[in-house]
Image (tube, rainbow, N blue to C red):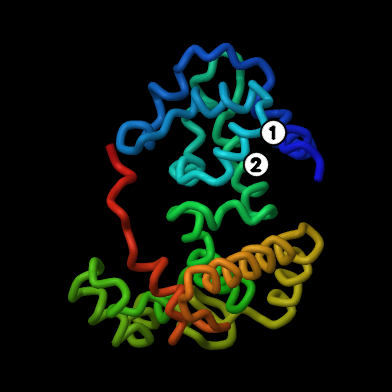
Amino acid sequence: MAKLYDLLLTDVRFREGLTACMNCGICTAICPAAEFYTYDPRQICNTVQTRDEEKIEALLKSDTIWYCGQCMSCKTRCPRGNAPALVISVLRKQSQELGYFTESEKGRQQYAIKRTVGENITGIGYCVTVEKIVPDMHPEQGPVWKWYYENAEEVVDRLGGNYRKEGPGALRIIPQVSMDEIQRIFEVTGGKKLQDSIEDFSEDKATEMDIKFNDTIEGNDYFNHLYTTNSGNHQK
């Protein structure tokens, strides 16, 4: 396998996101995530610039790279035009491709995102839609959401939408021709391959952790474990 730093260099986002970092720390000062998490984008850039394979591998296996919210505040303030958030994106992708994401709690949660948002996009054409936000799994939404969930079709249609029906309007059924195009986009861009990688490495991790794993969300103990487990060690 090529050196990790060399693999990072193959991604144009890395080459554009880290060209002349002088470790001034402005990115960390402006970063919303750094205020709440043990997270320092300046230190991440510094670590990557050392080209130290062990340190980069440790980053790929850590919770740290999953704290970034991709708000790009760092890019707007960097005096040299760097974008630590882009560096983070490339580190995340490499972690997923190599399976290192399963070594951290926040990394493992990428499987839950793939099974929800990821499969929503390729399956129904939406990141999130009403029927996917089941009240039992989202108690934080409260009683108003439960009522909306149970009466979605009536409410959406009254507001001018077209809930789960053919034709134009918000929350409509996406035509098959558009769904086929989405599938092709994922295939051509490598998105499907990355999703498969997340799935395969997650199944291996579930086996290692001796937790039941299957092809659905229902009855998938590994998914439920990731969805509900929080060590509480992430915030400052």
Disc 1 from disc 2: Cα separation: 6 Å
- The numbered disc on residue 90 is 2
Between residues 137 and 56, which one lies in front from this camera angle? 56
- Which residue lies at the image location 70% right of the left edge and 36% below the top edge? 13
- Of the 4 image quadrants, the one containing the N terminus is top right
- Whether residue 140 can be seen here: yes
Q: Secondary structure at mark 2?
A: helix
Residue 142: image x %, image y %?
A: 20, 71
Q: Residues within 10 Å of mark 1 (few under 14, many from 20)?
A: many
Q: Quadrant of residue 141?
A: bottom left
Q: Of callouts 1 and 2, which one flags the residue occurring earlier in the amino acid sequence?
A: 1
Q: State if disc 2 and disc 1 touch (CB < 8 Å).
A: yes
Q: Quadrant of residue 9?
A: top right
- Whether residue 127 can be seen here: no
Q: How many labels, in total?
A: 2
Residue 59: image x %, image y %?
A: 55, 38
Between residues 69 and 131, which one lies in front from this camera angle? 69
Task: Tell whether 43 sits left or right of 196.
Answer: left
Q: Secondary structure at mark 1?
A: helix
For badge 2, the amino acid type reads Val
Q: Quadrant of residue 123?
A: bottom right
Q: Which residue is mark 1?
A: 14
- Which residue lies at the image location 63% right of the left edge and 54% below the top edge? 96
Task: Tell whether 120 sits left or right of 226.
Answer: right
